[in-house]
Amino acid sequence: SSSSSTPSKGKSTKSNFHFMCLNIRGYTDPADWEKVQALPNFEKLDAILLTEHHLSGKKRPIEIVKSGWNIHFAAGPPKRGSSQHVHRGGIALLTRNTSQFTVSTTIHADHSTESDHQAATWTLISPLYAQKIHITGAYVSPNGSGTAELFTLLAQQPAFPADEVHLYAGDWNA
């Protein structure tokens, strides 16, 4: 999906922001990133919202970082018992370094808030875009409690100015 950006005087701007939301169903090894990079239009993307990554939020996969992307996490709760993944759910915003984004993160729900769900809003600012871009991402656990509370929390977010892009994306499961 893309949205237009109006250039301002004296500022070098891009005309479109290219974004994708992808349920990765568990990030396990570098081959997962190779599959993402093989997707159509990958080269045009400025940002990717990964849902259900199952990562802790502390370790950034080196293959993603080395390929020119930055990672901003909201991690899911630790899993019980042994399994291939250590955490459940999780959302991460990946931003391409060449898009020159400064990113601020507001976590609405994650394992630190003792929620089975994850939700965050990232505000992206770049000299290449005329206005801020806001992305609210969510992973709603199909087994989690507090789903109604999460939707209420998201509905009560402060409104951003009308000339700033705000995208909602995620794995809603509800």
Image: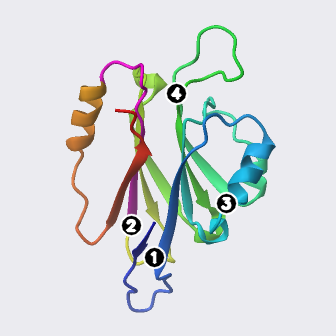
Residue holding disc 1: 129
Residue 119's spot in the image, x, y percent?
40, 38
Contact check, label 3 and label 2, Cβ < 8 Å: no
* Residue segment shown in magenta: 133-146
Cα distance, mark 3 to mark 1? Answer: 25 Å
Residue 171's spot in the image, x, y percent?
44, 40
Residue 5's spot in the image, x, y percent?
39, 79
| In this view, 67 is above or below 128 | above
> Secondary structure beneath disc 1?
loop
Cα distance, mark 1 to mark 4? Answer: 31 Å
| In this view, 91 is above or below 130 | above
Residue 136's spot in the image, x, y percent?
38, 49
Which mark is in front, 3 or 1?
Answer: 3
Residue holding disc 2: 132
Mark 4 / mark 2, whichever is N-terminal:
4
Which mark is in front, 4 or 3?
Answer: 3
Q: Please give the name of the residue rendered at 39% of the width and 20% of the height, measured from the top-left corner.
A: 144
| In this view, 34 is above or below 98 | above
Q: Please give the name of the residue rendered at 30% of the width and 26% of the height, measured from the top-left corner.
A: 147
> Which residue occupies the foreground of this view, 8 or 141?
141
Cα distance, mark 2 to mark 1? Answer: 7 Å
Q: Please give the name of the residue rendered at 55% of the width and 24% of the height, measured from the top-left corner.
A: 88
Cα distance, mark 4 to mark 3? Answer: 26 Å
Mark 4 / mark 3, whichever is N-terminal:
3
Does residue 64 show up?
A: no
Mark 3 / mark 1, whichever is N-terminal:
3
Contact check, label 2 and label 1, Cβ < 8 Å: yes
Residue holding disc 3: 39
Q: Which mark, by number, is residue 76?
A: 4
Which amino acid, by three-letter code, is at mark 1?
A: Tyr
Label 2 neighbour load within 10 Å: few <14, some 14-19, many 20+: some
